[in-house]
Image (cartoon, rainbow, N blue to C red):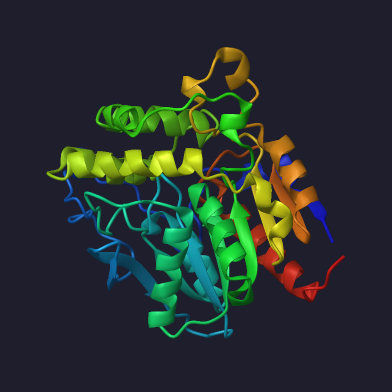
Amino acid sequence: MNQTMRLPAFLLALCVGAAGALGGTPPALAGDEEAAYGPQLEGFEYPWPVAHFSFTSQGEALEMAYMDVKPATPNGKVAVLLHGKNFCAATWQDTIAALSAAGYRVIAVDQIGFCKSTKPAHYQYSFQQLAGNTRALLVSLGVGRVTVIGHSTGGMLGMRYALMYPDEVDELVLVNPIGLEDWKAKGVPWQSVDAWYRQDLKTTAESIRNYERATYYVGSWDERYERWVQMLAGLYRGPGRDVVAWNSALLYDMIYTQPVFYEFEAIEVPVLLMVGDKDTTALGKNLAPPAVAATLGNYPALGEAAVSRFPRARLVEFPDLGHSPQIQAPDIFHKALLDGMRGLAADGGKKP
């Protein structure tokens, strides 16, 4: 039962730039602008207490950071939030608040290599490994079936998780997921891990801000976004700069070399695909020839094509929003999210 819903532009305009009523992100303080954080984001405060899951993987002793937010009035459901490449569990702040108010227990994870989790010097990254790590965390918490919500790179991970553990997923929500196209097949050239590393070492608050303004927020900027810029920039100002950049390079290589694009038809769980149509994100677009780059990151077309291939899917489009609709227009996004999840539940999980 594949359905598409486009939210009217005039409704979106009412909330673009407004903080979510259920826990909007505070603006960055002036003192944050030159803050330097530790390699596990030490010194940056998350909106809820952070716990750590300790485990061994590939011979490495690792810690996966996460927030486990329990609702005042439980509905018996658990939502697992998977962040994107340039995001952390904390950037889900408004979404955690909205889901918690709706009765969900919310578990927001920092994947290995990101944010407040371990950044190993040597690790063979794969979406399968990250999915397995996440599943091990949930098992340790006694959590069974979940709603998986993945944004950006977290969308690729969410799809892999649903493919690996279909009996443990009630529904899969994809928010502007990357990986709706195969960049390599379209002509984006390969780049070595060493080249990604050299590129990442040049990261500054200005480079982050310029990229996010153009790609995530449709050329606009709001002071609310600055907190998340400084969160990332602080990692590159801190003592862990080299290991942060190295893990980022390994993760870029994982994203480029491990497409989920060819497995959409095998995703058995109901899918809610939510797309900000103004998004232009595409891995390696800056490396591609201009004629190729111009064809990448066309999210309206990518969304329509993907929803036609998922066996059970609904598509929600935000015509005036970019890569991060949950941050750009939280009120509108979270209403659409909760309405869309109720719609999937009403379908009863039946095949079309």
Where residue 268 sits in the image (x, y, percent)? 71, 65
Above or below, 244 against 185 in this view is below
| Residue at 62% over, 14% down | 291
> Horizontal placement of 348 versus 120: left or right?
right
Above or below, 205 against 260 in this view is above
* Whether residue 319 can be seen here: no
| Residue at 26% over, 66% down | 63
Above or below, 204 against 336 in this view is above
Question: Residue 185's quadrant in the figure?
Answer: top right
Q: Nearer the viewer, residue 68 or 97?
A: 68
> Horizontal placement of 243 versus 107: left or right?
left
| Residue at 62% over, 60% down | 173
Q: Which residue of the protein is positioned furthest toward the front in this rendering?
A: 59
Question: Residue 352's quadrant in the figure?
Answer: bottom right
> Horizontal placement of 139 versus 314: left or right?
left
| Residue at 61% over, 19% down | 292
Q: Nearer the viewer, residue 172 or 70?
A: 172
